[in-house]
Amino acid sequence: MQVENHKEEVPFAYYENLFRQLDAEEAAKRTDCKWDGKEFYVNLLGREFAIAYPDYAIRAVDGGKLPPLPTQTFLLRYLLEGKQMPWAGEWKTFREMPWGELYIKPYTGRVLTRAAFTFGTRVAKFREAAEKMGAVPVKHGDAGYLFELIGGYRMQILVWEGDEEFPPNTQVLYSDNFAEGFAAEDRVVAGDILISTIKSYM
């Protein structure tokens, strides 16, 4: 494959190669993803994707659009490294989880600021998109929703609309099992994927 977009294609190719060496039965037990001997079935934000093994190919079970390459890389990493972790029912900010302080600046720009100016300027459209995705409304912010990300990991986005005095604002909360179940880099990517997916429904 000729690589044209190094930022997306190089990491994808790296994890695609690791995926070929995966122990499929072990991965299915570790992640609780269905494995039928040919494909893994992974549910991401309410959509199910079938991922062929050992030669990677992905299809949307609903016949719809395939996720972009960074999201496919995230799914590969989940099958390679993901694990079931119980949720104690609490929520954490990115900063409160391991390595959160170290990654807070890139996270703020890539997730919080982006979400604020994508959703806080169009709160009604944000609500419509979240409801189309089957998200559960929560009683925080001017609009807030709980999303099932993947495999028992949940996220909330809370949005405050901007006005003449204050810019729009957001907070993203993670179910507490993210602290042990995902590396900090993957928590950043999870936020990015969630924002992009909501935006695609707006």
Image: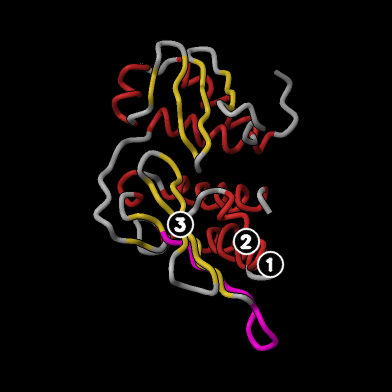
* Viewer-side residue, 14 vs 153: 153
> What segment is highlighted magenta in the picture?
162-173
Mark pair 3, 1: CA separation: 19 Å
* Residue 104 in view here: no
Contact between labelled residues 1 and 3, with CB atoms less than 8 Å apart: no
- Residue under pointer 1: 122
Against 16, residue 166 (above or below) is below
Quadrant in which residue 98 is drawn: bottom left
For mark 1, give the secondary structure: loop
Spot occupied by residue 74 in the image (x, y as percentages of width and height): 51, 37
Which residue: 53% across, 59% down? Answer: 107
In the rendered image, residue 139 lying in the magenta stretch gets the answer no
The circle drawn on residue 70 is: none
Tell which tag, 3 or 2, sits nearer the viewer. 3
Mark pair 1, 2: CA separation: 6 Å
For mark 3, give the secondary structure: strand
Mark pair 3, 2: CA separation: 13 Å
- Residue under pointer 2: 126
